[in-house]
Amino acid sequence: MGELLFETYGVPSIAFGVDAAFSYKYNQQQGVCDKDGLAMCPGFNTTHVIPFVDGEPIYKGCCRTNIGGFHVTDYLKQLLSLKYPYHMARFTWEKVEDLKMEHCYIAPDYASEARLFQKGAKEAEEKTRCWQLPWVPPPTEEPPSEEEIARKAAIKERQGQRLREMAEAKRSSRINELENELHGLEFLLKQLEQVEDSNVPSFLAATGYVSRQEIESARTKVTQSLRKAKGEPKNEQAETDKASPNANEKYSLINIPDDMLTTDQLIEKKKQLSLKSMSEGRQRLKQKRYEEELERERKQQLEDEKRLENPELYLEQLHARYKDLSEKVDQRKRLKTNGGHSNGNNLSGGIGRGERLNAAQRERMRLLTTAAFDRGKGEDTFGAKDEDWQLYKLMGKDNDDGDEEPDEDDAELARISSRLLDLDPTFVPNKSETGSSQPAEAPRARPLTKEDFQIVFGVERFRCPEILFNPNWIAVDQAGLDEMAGVSIRRLSCKDESLEERLTSSILVTGGSSLFPGIIERLEAGIRMIRPCGAPIKVVRALDPVMDAWRGAAAFASAPQFHTQTFSRMDYFEKGEDWLRSYQIKYSL
């Protein structure tokens, strides 16, 4: 700094000093402390302890640690950011500094103070502070008035009426189109009856149809669509009776022996057999569905009668049935998953779903290998015989896994669950059922309240300033503030016990971090633990810990002998910077 000031800026002279020493000298003049004592200055970045003997600082006995108010503020900022991560933007450095100076204090005993907050005692609640962030309550929605409800109902009714009119117009237009198409097909069939057989192909080519059957099929479809559009019920029996006379014409080759048919007729006969079997299968399936629907209606009617007869008993039976089915379905799922091992120890020797699938794959490989060895010699004629195709049926069979088709128990469980949801408001389906059949409901966001915008200071109030006495909490392996007093006294290497007593009888605490409430009592308790029993200890705070260093320096600069304590530019060029290093200032105010 001397080189910069003299050679770059050309200042005539400079004088150096220590802020803690200036503050101690100023407070000594004010009668706060004695000539012999200790100046303890927990500053912004560092903490100093300087012993004074006969009013002069003894620098060989001074002690310094790299801990100060900056670290306390930074530690508080970290704790608040971790505790309230959604308000991190609020924790600016300046605001955290203000919160530190306003709310933090030094605990007389950190362990006992922390236990108070851990137990949640009343005293801890009294020491807790709260910082309310700006918050605007959401607007409360008032229930709509009767006029508003009536107005919305009228609007909804008009909209519904408009939609009904549009649907009716669309339905009428559709009916007209279908009727015109049906009249056209019937007129085409009448014309086809009057056409000679030799002219039928040319007539059909002009109309775009291939055969009379195609026209009749189109007429049947249009008729069904027209009935559906008009809302008429289906007359399945009439359709069946109507279609039965045409069945003989449609499948005319089925009852004729093969030896009486040509090759083309045999091919046509196979097609008619396939079509007839599919048609009969559809009819059987339709009849089966119709019977199942009747059975469901009958069961529903019986259940309604039971419910009306004794509602409580009916509900109890439903719950019992639901419980039995639920346990049965869960047990089957466990068997499919792990072969019946609910504890995962594999003790019963069963196989799970994965092992079953592997067994099925091994069986398929065995069948394929057998077929390959059986037909490995000579010409490959696999598939020429009907029994060869039985191999694919065996390969596709998996009796152990029935996941592809819906199970009756699952359907019944879903029906009973739906019934219970309608009848019992307190009913809650099983997690397995809701997880498999219903999508997971997204968590609903809780509306923000005033408490969500409150920053609560509890243990942070005394935990952050505690690092002045325990720097190792923030990975600074140095002595605490109370230990530094003992280190400074030991560095003086004096055998005079009276001097040590005079030093501890006048300990001045200065600097911005000395403003924490409770620091005087904590220092006295800490220094008493490292001093002999009965040794006098007195700790005082500076009159103005922040500005006393400036006032002491101002008094030193205005003293008549100040020019003798300066280091001039000429001395720098003549004696060099080495003399500057050995320069000792005399704090004579």
Image (cartoon, grey):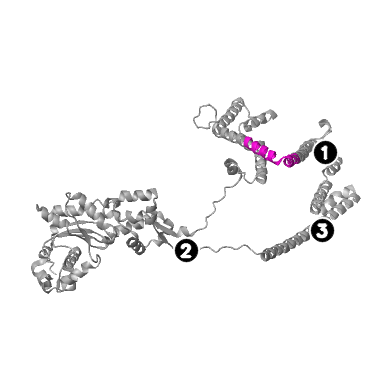
How far, Cα to Cα, is label 2 from label 1?
83 Å
Above or below, 154 relative to 211: below
- First in residue order: circle 1 vs circle 3: 3
Depth order, front residue of 516/217: 516
Residues at circles 2 and 3 in contact by the CB criterion of under 8 Å? no
| Farthest-out residue, front | 534
Q: Residues within 10 Å of mark 2 (few under 14, many from 20)?
A: few
Magenta residue check for 315: yes
Mark 1 or 3: in front is 3
Quarter of the figure with residue 246: top right
Question: Magenta segment, which residues?
Answer: 300-324
For label 3, the residue is 176
User: What label does residue 251 carry, if any?
Assistant: 1
Above or below, 383 relative to 204: above
**Left or right: 85 with respect to 321?**
left
How far, Cα to Cα, is label 2 from label 3?
65 Å
Which quarter of the image is occupied by the N terminus?
bottom left
For label 2, the residue is 135
How far, Cα to Cα, is label 1 from label 3?
35 Å
* Residue occupying image coordinates x 51% and y 27%: 347
Amino acid at pointer 1: Tyr
* Residue occupying image coordinates x 23% and y 52%: 526
Q: Residues within 10 Å of mark 1 (few under 14, many from 20)?
A: some
- Residue 305 screen position, x and y as percent: 75, 40
- Residue 572 screen position, x and y as percent: 11, 69
Amino acid at pointer 2: Trp
**Left or right: 53 with respect to 235?**
left
- Give the main secondary structure of the magenta stretch: helix
- First in residue order: circle 2 vs circle 3: 2
Any part of residue 131 in sight: yes
**Left or right: 543 with respect to 431?**
left
Residues at circles 1 and 3 in contact by the CB criterion of under 8 Å? no
